[in-house]
Amino acid sequence: MQKSGVVTVRDVATMAGLSLSTVSNVLNRPDRVASATRARVTDAIEHLGYIRNDAARALRLGESRAVGLVISESTSPFYAEIIRSADAVLSAHGYSSLVGSAYHDVAAAERLVRLFEEQRVEGLLLNPFATAQPAFRTAMRRGVPTVYVDADAPSPAHCSVTADHLAGGRMAVQHLAALGRGRIALVRGPVHLTQIARRMDGARAACEELGIAYEEVVASTYFVRGGVNAGEVIASRPAAKRPDAIFAANDILAMGIITSLAERGIRVPDDIAVIGYDDTDFALAARVPLTTLRQPATEIGARAAALLLEEIEDDPHHQHEATVLLPELIVRGSTLP
């Protein structure tokens, strides 16, 4: 054994009384080796505590059985579910997932893509924000199989899987209009995100088509604190100048808004109806159960992983596609009395 204490494949071969090539076959092509020989190598590995260096193997062979997931906001329950469902599909096919969050930082996105390429990932699932596109195009130019998740691909040469956020924004306003609400506040965060922009575009278009007055409120963040602050701004107005409904860009903002309104004696939904987006677990845990648009997160992650596997494994039937899935309106107490 080496003086450093690191057990090598040579140590395994010595203890098993076999050649390096035979041990290598046991590790990489066990079906080609007799069961008795495999048992000798397994016994030696267990006795020595040998751990194979898959990173080094990937560098030698140019393959890793790993996929990199670059997510803009991995702390979001929506993206957490995408990661979980994608990983389930990848794991079932013998691939591991390496996950990194850029947190809306272009430089961080570039570092993650480079890091995953250095690890010889065999494919990438990318959830880019608009300004990070150049970093991702670099990886695609190098021929790394790539599928865009909850975003449009920059060209027809790549697959994408996303929700129809434009339709989701329309559905939110149509629901509020059907309840007789006529003054709607559209609340979003400060950072431009394509998905959020489309939700707001859909909501604005529906308001204009239905003749409903609307205003836009920009919260300080996309998290609960941002919702609380937005709620404070709205609650500070005289009752006659407040909206009678709020469409929040995500559930977490909506929860903050509901909390803020309730603390100031404004009743939800009697005085102001509130609707969110995503249908995270938090929607049920809100002070008032939250009406929301359920995103098909499980389906998005699973479909994106399946498309990527087709590309990695050169499936002859694979065709690039842009899959768009509809959200679903989930009605709860924050809009219905």
Image: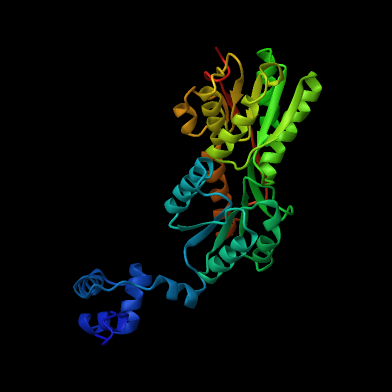
71 over 11 or under it: above or below: above
On the image, the x and y values in percent for residue 265 come to 54, 19
Q: Is residue 195 left or right of residue 68?
A: right
Horizontal and vertical percent for residue 278?
56, 34
**Position of residue 46 in the picture relative to residue 122 (left or right):** left
Position of the C terminus by quadrant: top right
- Classify residue 209 by image quadrant: top right
Expressed as whole percent of the image width and height from the top left, the position of residue 107 reads: 63, 63
Pick the residue in front: 26 or 136: 136
Front residue of 37 and 267: 267
> Residue 125's spot in the image, x, y percent?
57, 54
The N terminus sits in image quarter? bottom left
Q: Could you tell me which residue is drawn at 63 percent across and 26 percent down?
A: 236
Residue 156 visible in the current orientation: yes
Residue 32 visible here: no
Number of numbered discs: 0
